[in-house]
Image: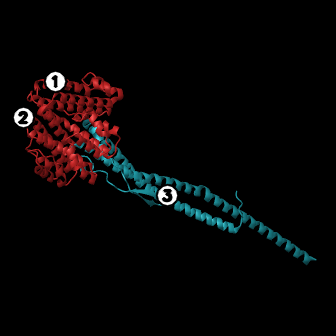
Chain colours: A red, B cyan
Amino acid sequence: MEYAYVNARIRAMKSRLLDPSLLEQLINKPDIDSLITELEKTAYREELEKAGVLYSGINRIEVAIRKDLVKRFRSILTLIKGGDTEAFLAIILSRWDVQNIKTILRGKKIQENPSEILECMIPAGELDEAALTELVKQPDVKAVIDLLATWGMVYARPLILNFKEFTDTGDMLVLEYALDTFYYEDAISKVKTSESDDARVLKNILITEIDINNIKTVLRAIRDRIDPDEVKRYFVKGSPEFDANKLLTMMKTGTIEGALKYLEQTPYQFITKIPPEYIAAEKISAFEKELERYLVKKAISQFLGDPLSIAIPIAYIWAKYTEVTNIRVIARCKVTEVPEKDLREALISV
Amino acid sequence: MEQINPTRMELIKKNAQIKLAEQGRDLLREKMDALIQEFFNVMESVSQSRGELEKLSDIAQHALLIAQAIDDPVTLKSASFATRRGVTLDIKGKNVMGVPVPIIEKKRFVKSLLDRGYSILGVSSRIDEAAEKYEAELDLIITLAETETSLRRLGSEIQMTRRRVNALEQVLIPELKRQAKYIEITIDERDREDLYRLKKVKKIIERKKKGIKEV
């Protein structure tokens, strides 16, 4: 794997990311049209022009930034070919495959119009636009799973294993949960088998993600007063620090404050410092925001890691994702005339 | 004016009709008072719920905006596929002073995390919060549907009762009274005529008697 060339290309892509001063300019734009004009001066110009044919206003921006994200991620996939690196990169990007498959299954269950389902696709993973269109064309949930199995997609396995339970209960949660846990557990098992630095970097990020997901699950379940034993099955395995028993103990405290106490001696102790009014109001999105910020910060800080490793593509993927989210936040807030203070609060600042 | 027989029997009938109409008017007034009281009770709860709904709607819209901005509208739309299902409600009725008003079954639409149909791992708590706020709004809208329908029906019943009271008070009772008065006047007139005739006859008879004695 020629990291020198690939990472040089990715660093060049990184240089086209919007710098904080440009984001500041976007925040200060008075309306959506001036925001589009400003964005047209950036790397988003091409996608904005294409999207402008069919869409206008906020939809134009959202479609353009989504397509740009897909284009950048797919170009990274074409740069990295062969070996563990390709597999590791596929792990990161296949979260979009999981999201797309879940959307298709949800849509098929309620017999949604295929064009409506297709609109929700983000083909940034292994499944490209053609593959997703073919999946959307299938008549029902069973046919979608069969087609995934025919293509040899690993995600067909958890779906086939849980399909009977789904047909018995009619509950899509069964298939969705199977897919989500399979994604993380399969990813962890793949990086565990490798001794390389790349595997270590990716494992570190994945474990942080698993921890964050599990902490969020605990906090959300406490807020909704769900029986701890019922929530147990929704914990993702793979983290050495937060195993199922520790998470269950956190849940059994029955209060947000109680659960937060267990985070004091961990890398996630920063969320214990969340203002007490959010704790009292059990506003989980405030905790989620801090946890996501931590994850994004950690992933983007990989730019400072080994320049000849997977750290650079990982950092770029997260940096790009954050940028797209921030542009969307600014655009949405401009459309609805949200005060600047609230807009700044909603941004993912790293 | 319609043809009225100025007889004592007719007068008795008219007086009975006046009494009945006045009783009816009083009863309708009592009904109207009760309906107005009920109307104001319901109106108080409706205006309170309306204010609450507006507040809740603003909060829900803000939660939706944040979810759309951070999580992408396509993620939200995807989550909505998982949660989409029909809303079935059991509607019964009750009578308030003869006015049929609906009673909508109190069903909570605010769902728990595991009942929304999507995996909690793939959906953020921002989407959860937006869903929860809209579910709470739906709860309130259904409660409002019941009270607002009651309010509308009570309102139209009050209007109808008022029209009836007015018709009795302004048209029917005055007309009956006028007719009774007319009968009374006519009977009195006839009585006076009879009295005069009798006196005249008496005079003639007395004059005749006097003439016979003188002869």
**Quarter holding the N terminus of chain B?**
bottom right
Report the residue marked by disc 3.
B32
- Within-10-Å neighbours for mark 1: few <14, some 14–19, many 20+: some
Report the residue marked by disc 2.
A196
Amino acid on which the number 2 mark rests in the picture? Ser
First of labels 1, 2 by sequence position:
1
Amino acid on which the number 1 mark rests in the picture? Arg
The answer to which quarter of the image holds residue A239 is top left
Report the residue marked by disc 1.
A9
List the single residue furthest toward the left. A195
Amino acid on which the number 3 mark rests in the picture? Met
Chain bearing tag 3 is B
Q: Position of residue B36 (x, y in %)?
A: 46, 55
- Within-10-Å neighbours for mark 2: few <14, some 14–19, many 20+: few
Q: Position of residue A150 (x, y in %)?
A: 24, 41
For mark 3, give the secondary structure.
helix
List the single residue furthest toward the top. A41
Taking depth in this image into account, of A276 and A321 the one nearest to the observer is A321
Q: Are marks 1 and 2 on the same chain?
A: yes
